[in-house]
Amino acid sequence: MTETHSEPQRLLHFDGLTAPVVLERADQLLPVVSGALPKWPFTQADNPGMPSPCFSIGGDGSGEFLCRAGDSGGAGKPWDAVNAVCEMVVELAWEQIRCNPGWLCLHCAAVEFNGRLILFPNRRRAGKSTLTAVLAARGYRVYTDDFLPVHVDEDGRIFGVANGVAPRIRLPVPDGFSAEFHAWAAQNKGPGNRRYKYLDIEDLADRGTMLPVGAVVVLDRDTDMTEATLTPALRGQVLDDLITQNFARTLHSGRILLASEGVTDTAELFRLQYGSAELAADRLAERFQTWTAPVRTIKHPRRLQTCDADLKRLEAGSPAFLPAARYLRAPGVTEVECEGTLYVSDGFGLGIHRLNPGARAIWQLVSEPLTVNDVAGILTAAFPDIPGEQIATDSLATMTDFVANRLVRPEPDLPEPVA
């Protein structure tokens, strides 16, 4: 890292990213940036210029800072030094995705256990960051406590990529933790404020370090529990969590769907119910002393490469539904089935849809061109106990939804209607 200077504007160039961070009269943030991102190297420059920054932080000497993402016009509310860096870290996660368009990025914690990663998907108040801190205090190597890029190699192996950001703990530490952990957290020299502290830990993985994903552990915290139990998790539950907690909103949704399926296919899946994070850490240490099975690969890694993220092919406006048109499935659609549930992504990569039983039945029918009346007629004949009016109403709603989400299109010899 280069020497610091006193110029009012400074550019921070983080390794692996194209756009820099700009500090305007905010040199006092540099120690906080270094403490929060100790394993994500950056260099400094004093001459602003291209490319445009991904994030700007401005100070006025009062200890408060205004943050601005990209080229957005205004700045938000004032932050103290730690919260300003927290906002910057979030934008760095987005910039990392923009610079690596083929990566999935999960909202999860990731900790190494004996050469493989255990992922803890984010759930509100589930305690992933606190559990990560407990594991860090015990010497486990941390890859992230918030966002994890995921890379699938040509052989179909799935790797988590360390982001170089220190784990962050919420303050104050609750009373239920041991005296040893309270003392460790209080004495930790990482930068913090009243609400948060970035932890200075010895074993934080260098940014870009990769390890195969070994397990996904869904956290279920219950403060009334006096023990911790680790049981197999349903694959569908884990797949839902991974899709919901995906961080890469600009990534093609078909790639997100296939990569999430790949994680659930290749990783061991568990549910951890606990009241105490320290007991939870004990249970994890007992279970993951060794890995008995080899690293598994996804079935069809090349399917990930078939997802086309070129959204320029989209016409202006949204497709309009025409009741007389014969519709069939649109090209480029990605389908994943998990425990009887069907997930579908449109060919443009805009969204992932979890089809209920009725929608799935209609989806099966539109493998060939049908009008909405055709669909309602087939279903009425198949389900004579359901009133025809209800089937007709449901068929219209579902087909309209399919059209709006670009899952179906009119017959190829007809132009796609646009509103």
Image (spheres, rainbow, N blue to C red):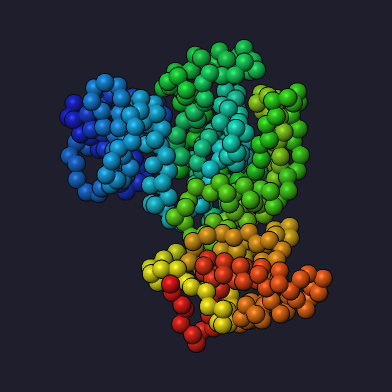
- Percent position (x, y) of residue 187? 49, 14
> Is residue 217 placed above or below 315 in the rendered structure?
above
- Whether residue 8 is visible to the viewer of this picture, yes or no, is yes
Seen at 75% across and 76% down, the residue is 380
Picture quarter containing residue 297? bottom right
- Assign the C terminus to one quadrant of the image: bottom left
Which of 157 and 75 lies nearest the eye of the viewer? 75
Camera sees residue 294:
no
Report which quarter residue 11 is drawn in.
top left
Is 160 on the left-hand or right-hand side of 367? left
314 vs 49: above or below: below
Q: Position of residue 125 (x, y in %)?
A: 60, 32
In the picture shown, does residue 9 fall above or below 263? above
> On the rendered structure, is 23 left or right of 230?
left
At 18% from the left and 26% from the top, the residue drawn is 6
Q: Is residue 5 left or right of residue 373?
A: left
**Is residue 332 toward the left or the right of residue 376 in the image?**
left
Q: Which residue is found at the position 42% from the left and 39% from the top?
A: 90
